[in-house]
Image (tube, rainbow, N blue to C red):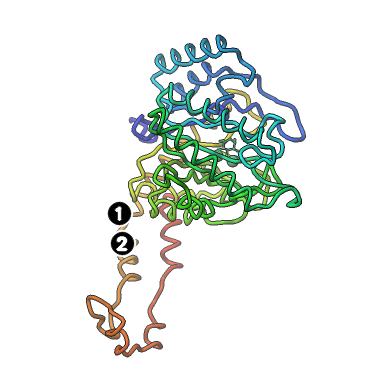
Amino acid sequence: MADSFKPRPEDKFTFGLWTVGNRGRDPFGEAVRPTISPVDIVALLAECGAWGVNFHDNDLVPIDATASERDKIVKDFRAALKKHGLVVPMATVNLFYDPVFRDGALTSNDCRVRAYALQKTMRAMDLGAEFGAKIFVMWGGREGTESDACRRPDDAIKRLREAINSLCEYSISQKYGYKFALEAKPNEPRGAIYFPTTGAYLGFIPTLDHPEMVGVNPEVAHEQMPGLNVLHSVAQAWEAGKLFHIDLNDQETGKYDQDFRFGSVNPKAAFFLVKFLEDVGYSGPRHFDAHAYRTEDYEGVKDFARGCMRTYLILKQKAKEWNANPEIKATLKEIASCNGGPKLPEKLTSAKLADIEFDRVHLAQKKLPYERLDQLTMDVLFGVR
Ligand code: GLT
Ligand code: MN
Ligand code: MN
């Protein structure tokens, strides 16, 4: 029997070089896995069934590489992509690793650091464009503070606005056709990061010179770290036409940045997220921004990558079952009904509304069988229905 949970190109599953290439280093311990080259990562991802691969500038080209080293790396990577049939839908820039960015990059107090960060981002855009990337993710990991004595936060906001405006101009002038996807995170590596939530970025985007070029890249774990409901953030982005990309992984609330395999901690939340993406017809990449447990070797990294995609596809199948389940359908119909009570006019103007008499006590008696609905959901997820 064919495996219906086998990833296919149309599933648009992608991984960053930094995800499967993660060597398991943490604040308390050294790397546990050897370095794996970008070319070998492409082979590994192809073996696991991924559609695409994304990178930060320095995941591919080391920060101190010479022009000829860069050319060779680009050539070898291009050949690997061709050989294995992988695409590069998204690129990004590393503005957090090097000590020069220890107090921020595009929001730094030092105008030279800000200019360098801008130049580095433009070069990262050049690199991504060479591989056909059309989405450019921006995660401001160091754009924040431990002490707010260091700058006024509204200055940081103004600096970021100016930077994104010039990056949009750069994309237009180079005809790159990029869409920028801003990625929020509340903290880590900084004590507090500016724009801590997807909603914060959604409020910022309309203040830009080219708001149509800029959207968001919500990450499951980044919304779950402070205990937010990631589906609600994703839905707000979608409804605003701003869901340009998505980072799928998992995370326990209140803990360090875990970047666990998709669906491994909160399968029910993952289910409703997958159901939403499939129901609304989100057509962008499904990017897994996670990494394998530190206990794994590279065979285990493959298990991790396969697990992310398999869980997505299982949840997609469960979403179909949920949508088709007659009891669930009937319950949804029941909770959406407006039977009894005053007959409302087609168009509810304020003049008409003023004259309607509502029976508040009757309205409050309507059955809301959410216990049953949630248990039906659990039954579908557990595979007993
Ligand atoms: C980093 C971070 C991620 C971002 C990546 C893009 S890098 O691993 O934890 O959430 O998406 O810069
Ligand atoms: Mn993360
Ligand atoms: Mn991410």
Q: Secondary structure at mark 1?
A: helix
Question: Closer to the N terminus: mark 2 or mark 1?
Answer: 1
Say which mark, if any, is on residue 101.
Answer: none
Q: Determine which residue is flagged by label 2.
A: 329
Give the amino acid type for the residue marked by disc 2 in the picture: Lys
Could you say which quadrant of the image residue 214 lies in?
top left
Asked whether residue 19 appears in the rendered view, the answer is: no
Dots 2, 1 in contact, CB < 8 A:
yes
* Ligand 3 lies in quarter: top right
Task: Give the answer, above or below, for where 302 lies relative to 339.
Answer: above
At 31% across and 84% down in the image, what residue appears? 353
Q: Residues within 10 Å of mark 2 (few under 14, many from 20)?
A: few
Q: Secondary structure at mark 2?
A: helix
Could you say which quadrant of the image residue 286 lies in?
top left
Q: Determine which residue is flagged by label 1.
A: 324
Residue 66 is situated, as x and y percent measured from the top left of the image, at: 60, 12
Closer to the camera in the image, 55 or 1: 55
Look at the image and tell me in which quarter the C terminus lies.
bottom left
Task: Report the side of 225 relative to 174 (left or right).
Answer: right
Residue 34 is situated, as x and y percent measured from the top left of the image, at: 66, 19
Q: CA distance from mark 2 to mark 1?
A: 7 Å
Give the amino acid type for the residue marked by disc 1 in the picture: Ala
Look at the image and tell me in which quarter the N terminus lies.
top left
At 45% across and 61% down in the image, what residue appears? 375
Asked whether residue 136 appears in the rendered view, the answer is: yes
At 69% across and 41% down in the image, what residue appears? 109
Q: Residues within 10 Å of mark 1 (few under 14, many from 20)?
A: few
Residue furthest toward the front? 111
Residue 283 is situated, as x and y percent measured from the top left of the image, at: 35, 41
